Amino acid sequence: MSQILDVQEILVYDLDSTRRKAKKVFREMFENLCESIQQIDGKVFNEHFWTRDKNGSLMSTDNRNDATYVDRSLLNGNVFEKVGVNYVAIEGELPAGMTFQKSGALVTPEADAISSGDVKTPYFATGASFVIHPYNPMVPIAHANYRYFQIGNPAQPTYWWFGGGADLTPSYLFQEDAIHFHQVHKEVCDKYDHSYYARFKKWCDDYFFIKHRGETRGIGGIFFDHLNNSNPQKILAFVTECTQAFARAYMPIVERRKDMSFTEENKYWQRLVRGRYVEFILTSDRGMRFGLESGMVSQQSVFNCMPPEVSWTYDDQPLVGSKEAMLKEVLKNPPEWV
Amino acid sequence: MSQILDVQEILVYDLDSTRRKAKKVFREMFENLCESIQQIDGKVFNEHFWTRDKNGSLMSTDNRNDATYVDRSLLNGNVFEKVGVNYVAIEGELPAGMTFQKSGALVTPEADAISSGDVKTPYFATGASFVIHPYNPMVPIAHANYRYFQIGNPAQPTYWWFGGGADLTPSYLFQEDAIHFHQVHKEVCDKYDHSYYARFKKWCDDYFFIKHRGETRGIGGIFFDHLNNSNPQKILAFVTECTQAFARAYMPIVERRKDMSFTEENKYWQRLVRGRYVEFILTSDRGMRFGLESGMVSQQSVFNCMPPEVSWTYDDQPLVGSKEAMLKEVLKNPPEWV
């Protein structure tokens, strides 16, 4: 533990500028990616600014200067059926007793959790998150979320870390898409640390695992959390490149699949896949749980990630040898794509 | 604690016959209610028997004599879009370390939980559960589930209890339906204990509360758990009448609403209401959690309760003064119906 704190103390000087830069990086991701989505779709986002009223309750506001955070939603577009985007850069106080699971943390295996303690604790958080539900079942669902977090005295935080990742959830598997998405992320990882891709790919498969179904949510990508084992500016540079890589990794897939023909059966299968997505979000996702428990953002923003139309049926196991069964095989045994 | 154990020890003689009778009562509920549903719908259930293979994995079987439990599903009926029914009468061993929350238990406030302990513990469980999703949005979703459970030596169990209840989740509120449903259940409660209805009505509102939404799942009914504060035969008599009351409480509502006209907007609102239903089941329902963690029943049977077609959108708050807003008002402030 002492070693980590030592490192963090030395880096205090850097953290104030890290904070400002991270805020800017995630804002740029938010703006640029929304712009790409609108260009490909032809429809524009609805934007909502959120602030707190005198009682501390969250309310939407027309005055963007008052806003503590912003969300955007695009519904029933030409290419995308529902896109939910949140951007946050917020200072505040965590409720007493709030705990962050550190399972899988890179640096502090001694500690199993970071707790906000018995009293309200200052925090700073900034991040951007995208959940993209395309209309065409041949286009995979995409999720990307990068964030920076610090707890404690803003000038000398007790803890700071970066987290995030990007992953795909296809209804129909196209190997070349999976390879492309992983390849783009691997290249960014390799520039910074040759161990990153293998670790973050596995972390992604492990994190987005639907335990009760015994299968992953999708074909993965990368995921990491509590990344703080190096100079914060260096980690920020890595995360910045990740935020930029997402469009390169995902948009070409959208372009080549969005006009493919499909049947009502394909669309129904997509709704079943979305059901699994909902199961993961509501039973296992830490971001969702944090959203629901912290009161940091409104219900609308927390549920901005939910799929639009979803189905469950008695038994959704596909026929042996079908395309749907091929996908299940991959979800049960995640392959190495690159 | 001693008092309870004393009571339970005295009643050991009764428990073996209670077990046999409870099994029969829930089987009758299962058969009779399925028959009523088929009669009103015109379509029949698919039935699946489940057993364990040599490795202990659950598998469906054609041989009903081998079955450890049975489920039935009715999909895309004329009146019901999806009905999921499970009937269980099963002996086995609980995994080590499994814990039953006793929050709200009637009899043993000292103990917060019943644990299966460090080793596998024998149990016996029997029950029937129904989740009924009608097609017409003017007909409420109905849920009914009654069960008997005992833990420990089958001849002299450490704990035994009854639990269950029945409740409605309307998309559109008809006061007379809510009053009728509650009235039928109140009459049964009043026959056995004048405190039952008030306590079990409140327990239902409290249990089926979607914390993150600040609203109840529906208009309630009755709910109780860990009921063991009296002669088991007397509690069984009460529970038996509850299982019989459900058809009287619900079927007349189905009859008078199933042919009402509705719009695409009404149908969409129903799918949003079902979204809240899913949120409750996946974040809060103990039965679902037990199903997922205990491995007692298959995935298909656990998810047999899920709604068929579900929607989420960015903001599902209804317009002020609308029928949908009237429903929300009731969900935020549960009234006394009778």
Image (cartoon, coloured by chain):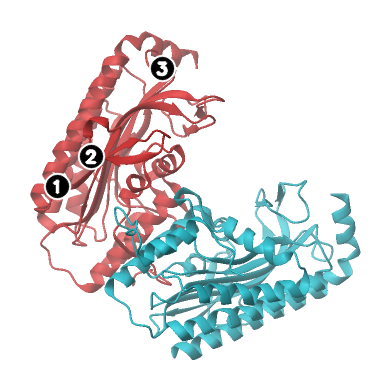
Chain colours: A cyan, B red
Q: For numbered disc 2, what is the local secondary structure?
A: loop
In the displayed structure, does residue A29 sit left or right of residue B322? right
Circle 3 Cα neighbour tier, 10 Å, few/some/many (<14 / 14–19 / ≥20): some
Inspect the image, locate mark 1, and give the three-letter code of the amino acid beneath it: Ile
Per the model, the C-alpha gap separating discs 2 and 3 is 33 Å
Q: Position of residue B257 (x, y in %)?
A: 13, 58
Which of the pair A3/B255 is nearer the observer? A3
| Residues at discs 1 and 2 in contact (Cβ within 8 Å) | no
User: Which of pointers 1 and 2 lies earlier in the amino acid sequence?
Assistant: 1
The answer to which quarter of the image holds residue B170 is bottom left
Q: Is residue B199 above or below residue A296?
A: above
Which residue is pictured at 40% across the width and 26% down the height? B92
Q: Position of residue B29 (x, y in %)?
A: 19, 35
The residue tagged 3 is B157
Which mark is in front, 1 or 2?
A: 2
The residue tagged 2 is B62
Q: Is residue A87 above or below residue B235?
A: below
In the displayed structure, does residue B60 sit left or right of residue A292? left
The residue tagged 1 is B37
In the displayed structure, does residue B258 sit left or right of residue A287? left
Inspect the image, locate mark 2, and give the three-letter code of the amino acid beneath it: Asp
Which of the pair B76/A44 is nearer the observer? B76
Is the same chain shared between marks 3 and 1? yes
Q: For numbered disc 3, what is the local secondary structure?
A: loop
Q: Position of residue B12 (x, y in %)?
A: 35, 11
The answer to which quarter of the image holds residue B162 is top left
Which of the pair B140/B34 is nearer the observer? B34
